[in-house]
Every structure is written in structure tokens, then in C-alpha cells.
Amino acid sequence: MPGSSWRKGLLTCLASILLQGCGAVFGHIPPETFLFHEVVPYTPPGEGGWKVAQVNVLLGRISRKWPQGAWCDVEVGVPEVNWRGRVYDVDAQEACAEASDKASRFALRQRAATVAALCDAYRTRMRELLKKSLPGAEVTRFRTPSIKPEKFP
Amino acid sequence: MSRTDDHASVSSLVELVHRFYPAGVASYEPEYDASEESRRREALRMVAIQEGAAWEELRQGIQETLPDVGLWELPSLLYHPCRTLRAYLPHSPRGADVQEAVVLLVSILAPVHAIYASHQTYAGNRVVRSRTWFPPLPPRFGPVEARLDALAHSMLGSVRLPNEVLFTPVPDLHMEHVPSGKAQLLHCLFTHNLW
């Protein structure tokens, strides 16, 4: 019905405004922000190697209590080669960027009580999202030493 | 297959993991990593990273015993208190669309191991179907499962934990990516990253 359709649209619009008010996201993270560094070399045939990327991500405004936004550290670790084949940096970067964008929106909707809890929700969601594109990936706080983290924005 | 002995009993393992994880502290709080329990766990992890001779012998033993199985060791010690070896069944060569493996997890916190089965179906570079099984594993995984268990027991002296021990709740301990109150011995002794 036309009447219910415009009401639905209005509700969607209001919901969107409310969500934006509760937690804004600072655009799309460029894939190259996830700059991978070799941690364990690939030594065929048995070892798949390992590489990690570290990024400080500004998720956005959680609420009026934290108008300055919340910085979250995220480290993603993936094999150089998995049982399917080579994990190219460019593919891993695209997967990470897409997952990070979605995870940040998800986390901001959780109304976390603290920045630490928000960042935890962001990383956990990101790991879930990476399961299909990068099976076996590890998503954690910064834990690999001697890597210069990237920053977004 | 479901051997248990004194050091692998539920009560002793629950007590043991409380020495390695701080009770009642969320994993993202600064107190978590700073706790005595986490420092104890990290110290063991660092030692294990340096000492891999027995594990390397086990890997060689598995490869010699199961020459048709493809082995992939993940560097899980970088993150978790366990070593991880994925043994791909002969019908799952590198690059295959359908990949099936028996996964061996060996804890560094106690002389115990866990074994589960894993399946992934790929379309391009994406996994379109993924599942895991804990015992009973489907019969096609049986021969590799039995060999991995026997070799881990004979070469490392470790004991395989049955499901009822692995899935024992430890609700006061917190692990990254495990919902609050849902931690099990499986997560504490090995990993949450099961795929």
C-alpha cells in the first residue's frame, strides 16, 4: 500500500539518523592500509608461512560521551600460502578492508560501555567476517612486536 | 580413544587453566595481560616457541606413517597455547575445491591433545561451505584420526581429551572472541580458532 510504503521509508530514514547520531563511521578504509609483513617465512612443502598487518582504526563516535571517536588497534594474521593456494597481499588487503568497514558499523551499533569493549566487538566481528575469505586468519590486538602500525584515517 | 588419567581429569584441568587465565577479567581489559596468570601462560608460550624438537619428530613420524596425507602446520603458538597440525586426506590435494583434514591440537599447558575433522568447499578463493566435527568423526576421517592419536600419545606422551572434557564450561574465564561466560576447556587449553 502506498501509505505503508512512505511510513516504512520515513521509519528507515529516522532509524538511519538515530544510528548516525549514536556512532558515525569515518568512510571506507583503503585496502592498502592493511600492509602485511612477513613473520614466518613460507618454506614448502609443509609450512605455509605467516604474515601480519597492524592498523590503528578510528571507528567513530560511540556516543555523545565520546565525541572524539574511538581508536582501536587491530592485527590481522594470515598464512602466506594456505591449502587452496597463495594468499596474495592484494586479496588479503581487500578482504580485510571490507571486513573492517562492516565490523566497525556492527560494533558501533552494539552500544559498548567502554572503548575497550567496542574494539573487542569490532575485532570479533572482523574475525567472523574473514572466515570465508581468509580461513584460519587471526584477528587480535597488536601482539607482534617490531611492526610499525598503519593508521586510518 | 577416550583415555583419561589423573592429570587429564576435568577437575584437575579446570584447576590448571585457572593458573593460566585470570578469573573474572575480560580479555580486552588491561588487567588481563598484566595478570600473573597471563604472564605465566605467556612465559610457557615463549619457551614452547623455542623448543620444538619433540614436535618436529612427531611431524616426521606422521609423514612417514601417512605418506599420502598432506601436512600443514599453522603457527598457532604465536596466538594460542597449542600447536596445530592439519592433516589433509588423500582426496584433498593442495588447491582442491573440497578440502578435508583431520586437525591435531597439542596443548602446551598440559600433556593433552584434541582431534577434530574439518571440511571446506571453495568457490574461487571464497569458502562457501565449512564445518567441523568432534568425535565421532565421519568414517572417512577414521584411519588418519587413529594414527594421529596413536602417534601423539606414543611420541609426546600426551592424552587425547574426550568431548565431555573438551566442552566443560569454564564460565569465569574469558578468551578473546569467545562470548562472555561461554569459555570451555577446549578454548583454554587449545584455541577458539577452530575451522
Image (cartoon, rainbow, N blue to C red):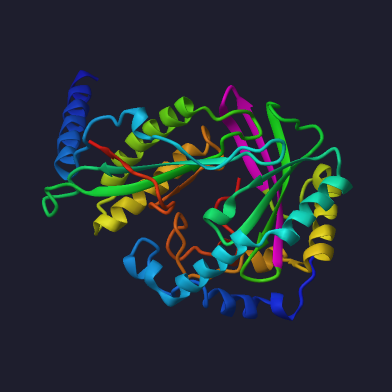
Q: Position of residue A76 (x, y in %)?
A: 44, 43
Q: Position of residue B73 (x, y in %)?
A: 67, 46
- When the figure is inspected, residue B113 is found, relative to residue B66, above or below; the finding is below
Task: Give the quadrant of the N terminus of chain A.
Answer: top left
- When the figure is inspected, residue A147 is found, relative to residue A42, above or below; the finding is below
Q: Is residue A114 left or right of residue B133?
A: left
Q: In the orientation shown, which residue stands out farthest toward the right?
A: B65
Q: Position of residue B127 (x, y in %)?
A: 58, 31
Residue at 65% from the left image edge and 62% from the top image edge: B51
State yes or no: residue B119 in magenta.
yes
Main secondary-structure element of the magenta-colored stretch: strand
Give the total number of marks visible in the rendering. Answer: 0
Q: Is residue B152 left or right of residue B83?
A: right
Q: Is residue B127 visible?
A: yes
Task: Give the quadrant of the C terminus of chain A.
Answer: top left
Q: Is residue B172 visible?
A: no
Residue at 68% from the left image edge and 43% from the top image edge: B118
Residue at 52% from the left image edge and 55% from the top image edge: B79
State yes or no: residue B96 in magenta.
no
Residue at 85% from the left image edge and 53% from the top image edge: B147
Q: Is residue B144 left or right of residue A45?
A: right
Q: Position of residue B106 (x, y in %)?
A: 68, 60
- When the figure is inspected, residue A25 is found, relative to residue A139, above or below; the finding is above
Residue B122 in which image quadrant: top right
Residue B69 in which image quadrant: top right
Q: Which residues are magenta?
A: B112-132
